[in-house]
Image: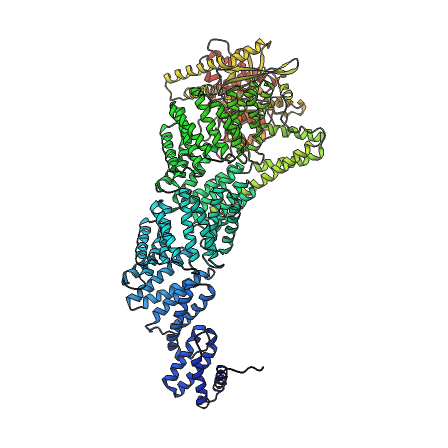
Amino acid sequence: MAHVPSARERSLAVLTRALEEIEGGRPPAEVLTAEVLGHAERLTTALGDAPEDAPANLVAGWIHWHHAVGGGGEESLGRAVTAFAPCLVYGVGPLPEPLLPDIADHAAVLAYDLLAQVLGSPGPETLRPVTEAWRRIVAATPPDEPERPVRLCNLGIALRNLAEWSPREPDLITRAVAALDEAVRTAGDPVPRATYRSNLADALLFRFERDGDVDDLNRAVDAAREAVRDLPDDDHAWATVHGVLAAALQLRHDRTWNAEDLDEAIEVLERIVRRAPAAMHLANLGTALRTRYQRFGRPTDLARMIEVGEQAVAATPAGHHKLGARLSTLALALRTRFEVNGDRVDLDRAVELGEQAVDATPAGHPDRPGMLSNLGLSLRMRFELAGERDDLDRALRLGAQAVAAAEEGHADRAMYLANLAAAWQRRFEATRNPEDLDRALAACDEAAHAAPDDHPDHGVIQANRCVMLMRRYELYGELADLDQAIGFGERAVRATPPGHLNQASVYATVGAAVYHRFERTADERDIDRAVFLLREAEEHTGPDHPDMPTIRANLASALWLRYTVRGEAADLEEALRAAERAVKATPADHPERARRLAALALALRARFERTGDRESIDRAVALGEQALAAVPTEHPTRANLATGLGGSLMARFARFGTAGDLERAREVCTAAAAVPGAPVRHLLQARRGEGQAALALGDGPGALAAFEAAVGMLPQLVPGYLRRGDREHGLGTVAGLGAEAAAAAVAAGRPERAVELLERTRGVLAAEVMAADEGVAELAAKAPDLVAEFRRIRAERDRLDHEAASPSDLPSSPRLRRASALMYERTRRLGAERRRLAAEWDNLIARIRRRPGLAGFLHPPSFAEIGAAAADGPVVAVCATPLGGLALLLTADDDRPAVRALPLPEATERKCRDRADRLSAAFTILGDRKASDEEKNAARDEANEVLGWLWDAITGPILDTLAAGGWQGGRLWWCPVGLTARLPLHAAGRAGAPGALDRVVSSYTPTIQALARSRARRTADTDEAPAATALVVAMSRTPNHPALDAASYEAERVRELVRNVTVLRDTEATGQAVLRELARHRIAHFACHSVSDRADPAKGRLLLHDHTTSPLTVAEIMRTRLPRNAELAYLSACRTADAGPRLADEAIHLTGAFQLAGYRHVIGTLWPVYDLISAIVAENVYRRLTRDGTTPPDTNTTASALRAAIRDLRETHPSRPDLWAGYVHVGP
């Protein structure tokens, strides 16, 4: 059927034709007949204000306008204005200019209703047309129009709300502020002006949150205060205006951390909700209370926060655009209460409300990313509580969705990324998959880019990077990660002003990181910094704050650690108080309770060890049992907790012999060693504890099995992908393991196995280097096709190992920060490359071992191979353990190696440490020019008493036993283990009686394999030897150090006796010059200062002319590979054979470095020596080596030459062992 036009359509058609005729030039009076005007009146009456009616209204309006202009009167003019009003609102035109002010008056009524509707359910698709409507209305409103201020205000409100939905249009909020500013300036009546000011304040707050301009924030507070001042108490906008003031005060608190602003904000909001308990105001009060609770931890704030949160949700109708936000805020409050009391009900409800919040909020809503992130956080916490993998997977999905929904530039994007990073970290901790940690770090780094220096979350984001890098340090053990963690942490400290909401947590995080670095480097500045930061965190945390127990537990650990270094009782007592308070504030089912109980137990054990107080050790054991019971059987932390309990049980048994303590210690350590997923260092310590207990119980085989398992974990503890310094640290954490393992093997009746275990646990890093050197020759003979790959991977690993570490303190200036960012990326890349090369190396070694005749390639040597080193004389390994000393006497009986175990009951670990400390202290006094004669006499007596004890307890019984077995004397090699490396075994003896110097020619070797390898090196043929046979370095003047006047004399005497000599004196003796000359000479003699570094022995160095800029360090010398004709390195300097107790078994000192570089013989010193005495000893040694300068030096007689020189000195100064006992020979 044909379409039949409606009356409206017919009228519109008539009017359209009439308007076309008028626009075509026909006079309106002729066109506007009574019939046309009738159609216009009927159409106007039929049309409404809807957008779809606007085109028809435009036609009718122009008809009425032409009629009014032609004399139609006010009635036609009014009809025109009525028709044109929707056209102005919806942007349909053109409209007659003279009529625009009147049209604006009518349009404003319609636009106001539309604005009210849109604000009830906002969105960009509805806000934008309303905003444009108000823009047109304001443009059509004359400057002197009394209604212009209110229209400007409505435009400002529309622009501000549209800006919230349009983050990519920064000009919207600027235009909003401008419109509201003009409204305030032009308003005459103070009452409406108060509401304009309130809206201006709201817009300024939004712009501050986006741009961070503090001027906007302060202007907002001032405007809001003026609005409150001018508004009558009975005004309908009273609650809204006061709410803006509260919001401004809270935001200013969040920026300046002035607590008075926050208190005032809460006071204002409490007044509002008492008068008008609307959902919006209740929700705002809850947010402010949460901020104050987070800062001060007041339980009343938490309770009130949840109460008003419940009320806000109840007062918000279904479908309201803010329902999701209020549900999410309530969920956050309940999760906070869960963190305090551990009630699973609160956490489950937080998850449920978070899900409802997300469901109630459509995609694209500006609040939705925050709700997704908040829900993800709750799910992550529930995973941590219950271990449901689905919760963690959902947390990761939601976190990723939150980040994706927050566009670049979103104010909270950085925090969403930080929450996502934390979820990845938790999955890493659950799976131990390094890729998860990499994802966590990537998210953290992206968060840092999204939170530049002026971002309010900059500090907490940097603190999160600190945490993530600490986790990577714990995974890989690379110091560079820990250094950079602290660098980011210190940046967080600088970015966090006093009173900041996150100040305490930032300080606590950085304090923990610095604490861990002290454990790694022993730099006491770090432990002092850790204590300072943790004390500051405690001071800035409310007594009831949920973080307080964690802070106090960490403070207790730091104070305990400092006590172990300095022995100050005040630190220990403060540690005990902090630990007690942390435990008291921790609920019975709190996931951190076990760790806090263990920290208290550790401090109590320390007090027992200091005072012998039985109650302290009994309580330490009881708390250790509670800590162990507080975690599931297979929880990864159980291994560490069990080791701590085992230590307390064994300490109590050692003092009181408490029945059952050893059995229980063994039981808990055995169980702990089987915990899946525990860190290797904890599993190893658990096996070690098991072995110690079994040994004390007399179960040799059981002890041996435990120690063999511990020794078997060493490759995992110090994997090949770590830098050498990191591997050294790992080995230092198990100092003494070799001695204990050897004691267990002897107790099990297997002394040969004791020797093998000693070799596997000592000199590990040097042995790898030497074995790899030998491996090239073996490969060339049996698998030549793999030699190039072997050399390539080894060279690349060496190169990466020597890359410079990153600085620990990332600087503040933009240029330096960019450099630090590059260093950070470089460190990450180098770590990944080292791990890749380590995997390639392991794969290559596996392939080599599959080749014929290479099954044992780079495997530890057997006893038969080790024992060959005793062919030229006995090798004696001397051990000290907590239960007593032990000597392994390795001899070659009938050309077959044999070993005999000799108990040394007096040489306990405690006694050996005590004697070594006393000897060191005595020699320090004797070398101090300021010491009195009385002090020096007492020191000499002390030194001689220690040498006498050393003879009685160790050296004498060993030599007597060897003699009783038929040994005729002569050469003997000492292989001191652990603490005994600090003792001069070669100089032991009672004054006036024959001692070691009289009965034996002593040499030392760091390991038995090192001795065998030194013997294997043969001097090149004479015609291949370089013409200059000796390099002499003489530093009589050293920058920043005292003069060594005898150094020149010493150099001259060596030159005269050796003859073919190159001498580098003072300014000539630079590190690079020395390294160049070493390869050209068979002998290297140094008369100079040296420095040993017990915290990092590889930094020990010879002090040459450029030592402040290019030091010749232990590490540098170890990297050097000298020709096979390198014979003797004579180090006439202080402490060149001292690595300190932690790494004594690795021989990481100058003497060991020169041996590793290729010298068969090295002469070094155990403690400080005198330059004149050193010159005398050197002259006497070279006299014997060269037969008073008549022959080339016979370095094969180095040991006997040194012994003779020392004996000469002893004869002259028998009561001054500080003059002669410190010189040692290392080599064959």
Relative image position of residue 409 (x, y in whole percent): 47, 56
Residue 1043 appears in view: no
For residue 192, side relative to residue 392 (left or right): left
Q: Say which quarter of the image contains residue 613.
A: top left
Is the residue 1075 above or below the residue 295 in the image?
above
Q: Say which quarter of the image contains residue 72.
A: bottom left
Colouring style: rainbow
Q: Nearer the viewer, residue 1046 or 244?
A: 244
Check the image and name the residue furthest to the bottom. Answer: 30
Q: Say which quarter of the image contains residue 1183.
A: top right
Residue 302 appears in view: yes
Q: Nearer the viewer, residue 373 or 755?
A: 373
Relative image position of residue 461 (x, y in whole percent): 45, 47
Relative image position of residue 201 (x, y in whole percent): 35, 60
Is the residue 539 above or below the residue 731 in the image?
below
Where, quadrant-wise, is the N terminus in this rendering? bottom right
For residue 622, side relative to residue 1112 (left or right): left
How many discs appear? Answer: 0
Where, quadrant-wise, is the C terminus in this rendering? top right
Is the residue 170 above or below the residue 1225 in the image?
below
Relative image position of residue 1021 (x, y in whole percent): 67, 23
